C-alpha cells in the first residue's frame, strides 16, 4: 500500500509541475503581448511628441513672421506721419 501512496503523490506532483509549466507558458505569452503593446504605445507617444514639436516650430515661425510684419507696419507709419492725419 505504501507504493500506491507514493505513486499517488508522484502523480499529484507531476500534475502540479505540468500546471506550473502551462502557467509559465501563459505568462510568457501575456508578457510578450504586453511588451508588444508597450512598444506600440511608445511609438504612438513618440509620433505625438514629434507632431507637437513640429507644431511648436510652426507656431514660432508664424509668430516671427507676424512680428516682422508688425515691425514693417510700424516703420511705414513712423516714416509717413502724414498718413495719421
Image (cartoon, rainbow, N blue to C red):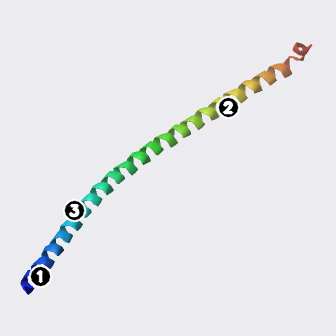
- Secondary structure category for the residue under label 3: helix
Residue where numbered disc 2 is placed? 63
Mark 2 in CB contact with mark 1 (< 8 angstroms):
no
Q: Position of residue 19 (x, y in %)?
A: 21, 66
User: Which mark is first along the chain, 2 or 3?
Assistant: 3
Q: Is residue 13 left or right of residue 44?
A: left
Q: Is residue 24 left or right of residue 42?
A: left
Q: Is residue 1 above or below residue 36?
A: below
Q: Position of residue 52 (x, y in %)?
A: 55, 39
Residue drawn 89% across the image and 17% down it:
81
Q: Is residue 23 above or below residue 33?
A: below
Q: Which mark is residue 5?
A: 1
User: Which mark is first along the chain, 3 or 1?
Assistant: 1
Q: Residues within 10 Å of mark 1 (few under 14, many from 20)?
A: few
C-alpha span from label 1 to label 3 = 26 Å
Q: Is residue 79 above or below residue 56?
A: above
Residue closer to the observer: 26 or 60 = 26
Residue where numbered disc 3 is placed? 22
Amino acid at each position: 500500500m505504501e507504493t500506491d501512496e507514493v505513486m499517488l503523490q508522484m502523480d499529484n506532483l507531476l500534475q502540479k509541475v505540468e500546471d506550473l509549466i502551462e502557467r509559465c507558458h501563459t505568462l510568457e505569452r501575456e508578457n510578450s503581448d504586453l511588451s508588444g503593446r508597450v512598444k506600440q504605445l511608445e511609438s504612438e507617444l513618440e509620433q505625438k511628441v514629434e507632431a507637437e514639436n513640429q507644431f511648436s516650430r510652426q507656431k514660432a515661425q508664424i509668430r516671427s513672421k507676424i512680428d516682422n510684419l508688425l515691425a514693417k507696419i510700424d516703420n511705414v507709419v513712423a516714416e509717413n506721419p502724414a498718413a495719421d492725419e
